[in-house]
Image (tube, grey):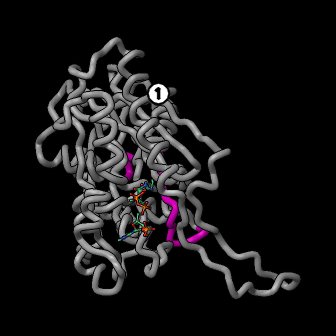
Amino acid sequence: MKVKIVGTGRCVPSNVVTNDMLSTFLDTSDQWIYSRTGIKQRYISTGESNSQLCIEAAKKALKNANLNGKDIDLIIVATITPDKVTPATACLVQSAIGASSAMAFDISAACSGFVYGINIASQFINSKAYNNALIIGGEVLSKILDWQDRSICVLFGDGAGAAILSRSEEDCIKSIECVSVGEKSDCLTCDGLELKNIYVPHQEEFSNNISMNGKEIFRFAVRVIENSIERILNENNLTFDDIDYVIPHQANSRIIEAVIKAKGYDKEKFYMNMSQYGNTSAASIPIALDELNKNGLLKEGMKLILIGFGGGLTYGSALINWKK
Ligand code: COA
């Protein structure tokens, strides 16, 4: 599609929580967490809301793109932890950046949300309905974790990442595919609002924390990464040598290492930063993309593969020809 990424930004809460800090109140250890997941620390909100993180990431992306809020005509926030049921987080971002004529809405595709957002926005830009879109993955997952459950709460972190998409002369976003596998919805769940009305009393047991089948998701994720890379290489007549970076969702380094081992891929090409952030769901890919961009690691013409996977179950992948 004739769409390119022209700016990126990220924002995380100020509070860093190391594995050792978790082991002060959970029966866990830095050794267990790091060896099973590659995670060393994560950022956990002590007051920053999802919309605040998204707004800050959006402002940085605008600056990086040399645009201002008025230039943005589409805002999509991918999140499963919005501040409010309504308004959408995207509307709060819209107001804060002054994108007064934008269409703004949230999408719920868990850890695939950012790639889903890129897909939706690219269709609008490619069809010339809109010129500049702001896509944000933002989460405050710490709101939906059981902090007594060592098998879940050690994995996740809070944060937001943003990217701005604009029209391009060349096809810079290629082979984008987003798939949902609803029959596997039980693998990763978090209940929404309680059914509570004059006919149904409050349920004492009601909880809305994440629960998941870790082993099943692990296998799903390995398969998704392997198949997505092969599909993109085949569709574009490329070999893995032509790819500069793969930016997978940052759930667990062992998932990525399993792919590298099975396929013999060059490990250096897989960008990994979960050691610092943990799994930030929809935010993980745009945070990683922004790190690559701001560290000067992206050069014009580079080929990047983005791969998201997670609750739904959902997955999504795309080939990006980097051209700012
Ligand atoms: N610290 C110490 N021990 C822990 C622990 C923790 N934080 N969490 C679990 N354990 C224990 C378990 O209780 C279990 O003990 P047991 O053998 O006495 O019952 C043991 O460690 C092994 O647990 P298991 O669940 O088999 O570990 P695992 O090797 O499968 O790793 C995950 C668990 C969750 C790290 C792994 O399955 C995973 O990463 N899956 C993908 C999940 C994911 O990424 N979800 C989000 C997708 S978007």
Quarter holding the C terminus is top left
Disc 1: residue Cβ within 8 A of ligand 1's nearest atom: no
Please report the residue visible at 25 percent of the width from the left and 77 percent of the height from the top: 15
Residue sitting at x 35%, y 37%: 306
Q: Is residue 104 left or right of residue 200?
A: left
The answer to whether residue 125 is above or below residue 24 is above
Q: Amino acid at mark 1?
A: Asn
Please name whichever residue, 110 or 154, is drawn nearer the observer in this view of the structure. Answer: 154
Q: Position of residue 226 (x, y in %)?
A: 39, 31
Q: Is residue 311 above or below residue 240?
A: below
**Mark 1 = which residue?**
126
Q: Quadrant of residue 271?
A: top left
Q: Secondary structure at mark 1?
A: helix
Q: Which residue lies at the image location 46% right of the left edge and 27% below the top edge?
A: 126
Q: Whole-percent x and y of residue 127?
A: 51, 27
Q: In this image, 268 relative to 104: left or right?
A: left
Verify whether residue 149 appears in magenta: no
Q: Quadrant of residue 65?
A: top left
Q: Quadrant of the N terminus?
A: top left
Q: Position of residue 245 (x, y in %)?
A: 23, 34
Residue 46 appears in the figure: yes
The quadrant of the rendered image in which ligand 1 is seen is bottom left
The residues colored magenta run: 69-86
